[in-house]
Image (spheres, rainbow, N blue to C red):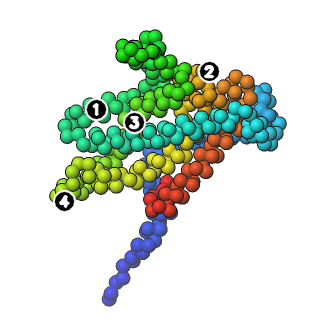
């Protein structure tokens, strides 16, 4: 007599596992919980505050009880004589930082990757990324002291060469470049960490094959290293384009002064001065919402263009 054994369908077992993914991978979801809570509390919950841009906000009445004014704040914002200048300054400073500051971590990472001595490489990498952990208040004080017309070491050298001291921090011709190069000094080492990690993921056989073909170090960088980190460069460039209206609020606020408002006053500092100085919270919220909307449009457009060119976008 032949006996039959009950068999469980593999598809039913797989369906059972897929039915409760939260229970099956509870440890992974638990690890992600702090980051999700951070995004929820500090990124999504405060979004309700954008309605201040459409209200005549009053501190006593609160956000919900303040009267609606529609697009009045936006009309007032675009009619201000200072606003076109502020937008122009933001774009100019941000684009200069993009042109000179974005390639800096890439170049630094390529140079660090070419170092042979591991100990020296670690020392150089540590020295270059330590400035990232220094606040802009301290960095601004260092820059102001170095460029001081009376006691700054830079002007001491200029005077020793027989020239007159230069008032760098109050000269409109120099101030934007001071912002750019101080930002590169502070952030290039930290940004190079991502590209160094991407360079470590390139197969060594590609470099060996290039060496056999007679390629020198420069050609290996151009034909192996750069193509190997191209996707990383594209993704970080897309993120940078999405923040094109973020020209560095803390940096500019610490370093600028009324003599350079014409070239240094950006949207963030303008919002800060008007919002706290004149208590026009609705107007400043409208300016911030305008900046965020433009950044979102630029990010989507840049991502679409990257996909059209055959690269992997963010979404």
Q: Identify the residue at image location x=61%, y=51%.
A: 297
Element under disc 1: helix
Please tell me whether residue 248 is drawn above or below residue 1 in the rendered image: above
Of the image marks 1 and 2, the number of the one nearer the N terminus: 1
Along the viewing direction, whichever of 108 and 42 lies nearer the viewer? 108
Residue 188: give its label.
Answer: 3
Q: CA distance from mark 1 to mark 2?
A: 38 Å
Q: Where's residue 278, x and y in %?
A: 73, 24
Residue 217 located left or right of residue 92: left
Along the viewing direction, whichever of 40 and 171 lies nearer the viewer? 171
Q: CA distance from mark 2 to mark 4?
A: 59 Å
Q: Which residue is mark 4?
A: 213
Mark 1 neighbour density, 10 Å: few (under 14) some (14–19) many (20 or more): some
Residue 258: give its label.
Answer: 2
Whether tag 2 and tag 4 are in contact, CB under 8 A, the answer is no
Q: Nearer the viewer, mark 1 or mark 2?
A: 2
Whether tag 4 and tag 1 are in contact, CB under 8 A, the answer is no
Q: CA distance from mark 1 to mark 3?
A: 12 Å
Single out the residue that lies furthest toward the left.
Answer: 212
Element under disc 2: helix
Of the image marks 2 and 4, the number of the one nearer the N terminus: 4
Mark 3 neighbour density, 10 Å: few (under 14) some (14–19) many (20 or more): many
Q: Which residue is mark 1?
A: 124
């Amino acid at each position: 007599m032949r006996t039959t054994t009950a068999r469980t369908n593999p598809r039913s077992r797989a369906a059972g596992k897929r039915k409760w993914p939260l229970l099956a991978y509870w440890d992974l979801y638990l690890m992600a919980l702090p980051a999700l809570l951070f995004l929820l509390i500090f990124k999504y919950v405060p979004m309700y505050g954008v309605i201040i841009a459409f209200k005549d906000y009053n501190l006593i009445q609160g956000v919900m009880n303040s009267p609606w004014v529609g697009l009045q704040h936006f009309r007032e914002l675009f009619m201000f004589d200072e606003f076109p200048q502020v937008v122009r300054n933001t774009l100019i400073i941000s684009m200069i930082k993009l042109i000179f500051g974005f390639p800096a971590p890439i170049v630094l990472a390529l140079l660090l990757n070419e170092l042979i001595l591991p100990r020296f490489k670690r020392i150089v990498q540590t020295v270059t990324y330590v400035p990232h952990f220094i606040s802009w208040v301290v960095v601004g004080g260092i820059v102001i002291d170095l460029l001081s017309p009376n006691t700054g070491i830079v002007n001491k050298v200029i005077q020793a060469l027989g020239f007159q001291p230069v008032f760098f921090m109050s000269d409109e011709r120099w101030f934007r470049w001071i912002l750019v190069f101080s930002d590169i000094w502070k952030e290039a080492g930290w940004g190079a960490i991502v590209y160094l990690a991407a360079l470590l993921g390139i197969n060594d056989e590609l470099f060996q094959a290039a060496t056999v073909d007679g390629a020198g170090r420069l050609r290996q960088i151009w034909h192996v290293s750069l193509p190997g980190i191209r996707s990383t460069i594209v993704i970080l460039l897309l993120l940078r384009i999405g923040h094109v209206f973020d020209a560095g609020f803390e940096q500019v606020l610490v370093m600028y002064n009324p003599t350079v408002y014409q070239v240094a006053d950006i949207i963030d500092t303008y919002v800060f001065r008007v919002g706290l100085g004149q208590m026009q919270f609705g107007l400043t919220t409208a300016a911030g919402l305008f900046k965020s909307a433009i950044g979102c449009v630029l990010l989507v457009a840049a991502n679409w263009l990257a996909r059209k060119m055959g690269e992997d976008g963010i979404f």
